[in-house]
Image: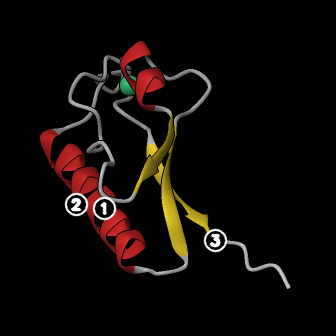
Amino acid sequence: MSQLKSPGLSSEAIAKRMAEAEDALKRMQENPRVSKIVVVVPADACPACMEVFGTYPKDQVPRLPMDACTHPLGCRAFYQPFLTEIYP
Ligand SMILES: [Zn+2]
């Protein structure tokens, strides 16, 4: 009898995700070419994550993963840098 993997993430997996997100955010905040931070959420994200989808000033970025996330696979929102384009 095969057992399905339990839904949701282990606390270790969540801690790892938090550390990764924090690290990524820090690097973007330190990069002068990054003008803003975009929070990207998957198309099937839960309502809590959908709400944070958007572009934020570097010092007003919401913390990921979302505490309020109700998705069975855990919060999959992530940061993406919004680069300053240099026009000639
Ligand atoms: Zn979510």
The image position of residue 75, as x and y in percent, is 36, 33
Instruction: Check disc 3 and report the residue beneath it.
Output: 84
The residue under label 2 is 19
Q: Which of marks 1 and 3 is nearer the N terminus?
A: 1
Q: Which residue is situated farthest in the bottom direction here?
A: 88
Q: In this view, does 81 lie to the left or right of 6?
A: right
Residue 20: image tag: 1
Asked if the residues shown at circle 2 and circle 1 are in contact, with their CB atoms under 8 angstroms apart, the answer is yes
Q: How far apart are marks 1 and 3 (CA)?
A: 23 Å
Callout 3 amino acid: Thr
For the residue marked with disc 2, what is the amino acid? Answer: Ala
Mark with earlier residue (3, 2): 2
Whole-percent x and y of residue 23? Answer: 29, 68
Q: How far apart are marks 2 and 1 (CA)?
A: 4 Å
Residue 23 vs 13, above or below: the answer is below
- Seen in the image, is 17 located left or right of residue 24? left
In the image, ligand 1 is in what quadrant? top left
Residue type highlighted by circle 1: Glu
Circles 3 and 2, Cβ within 8 Å, touching? The answer is: no
The residue carrying mark 3 has its beta carbon less than 8 Å from ligand 1: no
